[in-house]
Image: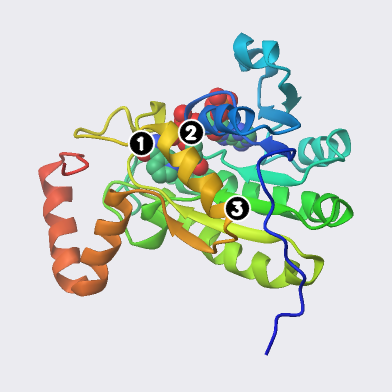
């Protein structure tokens, strides 16, 4: 049966985009790729707008104060950006702790607040904005740690997993208003978040390019890189073996991309 929605996959050219946590890392790469692709306007969400780099301001990027865990802040951002057609939910937090054997149990709650509830806050606030602008697209920057349970990723792995389910449910709920939702399964990337991890990592620009291409194709859930794809395959092929390997890695204490 044909879908009830009339989706037109949004293009980067001429779109109006908001990137959460756009001031650095993968978020910055999204801002750069959106500009390079001819976006009409790019809003850079940042907890502290002073952190928005000068080159972005020079390029006409509009800084927007935004803490995604604060509903008032999110509501104000939605009011300040009424023309958004592409929402990139990039902001995330990784507390670098264990989940059970931790002396800081509150970190897992914070990881859930940012990665899951923060993303949910944004989708709820911007769904009517996107609907008013013809449907548009949501891109959720998730992690391979949200697709398979991952060592040393305490509450981050479960929180990204919750955000992956959120992506699917949001896609179904927003189908009728013509909003596409693309979930990105991202491996290890060379940003501040992963600066404690050994091994080779992806270039943030490649993640942003792949993510925007996936959005334009109207894709649902996409591995952005080889590491994400290979890790998901290893887990799917033999979950018990994968778990044994995870326990071994936890005992060794070495955090590595394995490449
Ligand atoms: N790096 C990796 O290996 C990797 C792998 C898979 C997925 N990811 C995901 O990719 C996304 C970007 O991460 P990154 O690697 O670029 O990390 P990053 O350099 O640590 O950047 C994280 C960004 O999120 C922002 N942020 C954190 N909490 C926020 C909040 N409550 N409200 C608004 N913004 C908030 C940060 O703002 P401040 O500057 O104010 O702290 C920063 O801009 C995250 O969702 C992350 O989970 C990263």
Q: Is 23 situated left or right of 189 in this image?
A: right
Q: Which mark is residue 216?
A: 3
- Secondary structure of the residue carrying tag 1 is loop
**Number of numbered markers:** 3
**Distance between the Cα atoms at labels 2 and 3?**
18 Å
Q: Residue at x 10, y 44 (%)?
A: 252
Q: Nearer the viewer, mark 1 or mark 3?
A: 3
Question: Is mark 2 in CB contact (under 8 Å) with mark 1?
Answer: yes
**Distance between the Cα atoms at labels 2 and 1?**
8 Å
Circle 1 residue: 189
Circle 2 residue: 26
Q: Residue 153: give x, y in percent of width and height.
A: 34, 47
Locate the C terminus by quadrant: top left
Q: Is 178 situated left or right of 115 in this image?
A: right
Question: Is mark 1 in CB contact (under 8 Å) with mark 3?
Answer: no
Question: Is mark 2 in CB contact (under 8 Å) with mark 3?
Answer: no
Q: Is mark 1 within 8 Å of ligand 1?
A: yes
- Asked if residue 203 is positioned above or below residue 241 in the image, the reply reads above
Q: Does the image show residue 94?
A: no
Q: Residue at x 48, y 53 (%)?
A: 184
Determine which quarter of the picture holds residue 223: bottom left
Q: Does the image show residue 242?
A: yes
Q: Residue at x 34, y 62 (%)?
A: 148
In this rendered view, identify the residue nearer to me: 1 or 235.
Answer: 1
Q: Residue 22: give x, y in percent of width and height.
A: 60, 29
Q: Which mark is residue 8?
A: none
């Amino acid at each position: 049966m044909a879908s009830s929605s009339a989706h037109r996959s949004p293009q980067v050219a001429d779109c109006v985009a908001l990137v959460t946590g756009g001031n650095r890392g993968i978020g910055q790469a999204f801002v750069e790729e959106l500009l390079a692709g001819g976006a009409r306007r790019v809003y850079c969400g940042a907890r502290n707008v002073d952190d928005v780099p000068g080159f972005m301001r020079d390029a006409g990027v509009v800084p927007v104060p935004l803490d995604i865990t604060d509903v008032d802040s999110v509501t104000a951002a939605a009011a300040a950006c009424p023309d958004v057609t592409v929402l990139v939910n990039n902001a995330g937090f990784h507390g670098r702790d264990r989940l059970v054997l931790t002396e800081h149990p509150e970190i897992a709650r914070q990881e859930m607040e940012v990665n899951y509830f923060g993303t949910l806050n944004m989708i709820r606030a911007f769904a009517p904005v996107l609907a008013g602008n013809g449907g548009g697209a949501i891109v959720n920057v998730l992690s391979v740690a949200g697709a398979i349970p991952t060592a040393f990723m305490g509450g981050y792995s479960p929180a990204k997993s919750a955000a992956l389910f959120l992506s699917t449910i949001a896609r179904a709920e927003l189908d009728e208003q013509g909003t596409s939702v693309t979930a990105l399964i991202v491996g290890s990337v060379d940003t501040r978040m992963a600066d404690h991890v050994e091994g080779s990592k992806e270039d943030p620009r490649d993640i942003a390019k792949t993510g925007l291409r996936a959005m334009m194709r109207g894709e649902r859930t996409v591995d952005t890189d080889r590491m994400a794809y290979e890790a998901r395959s290893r887990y799917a092929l033999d979950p018990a073996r994968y778990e044994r390997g995870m326990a071994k890695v936890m005992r060794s204490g070495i955090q590595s991309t394995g490449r």
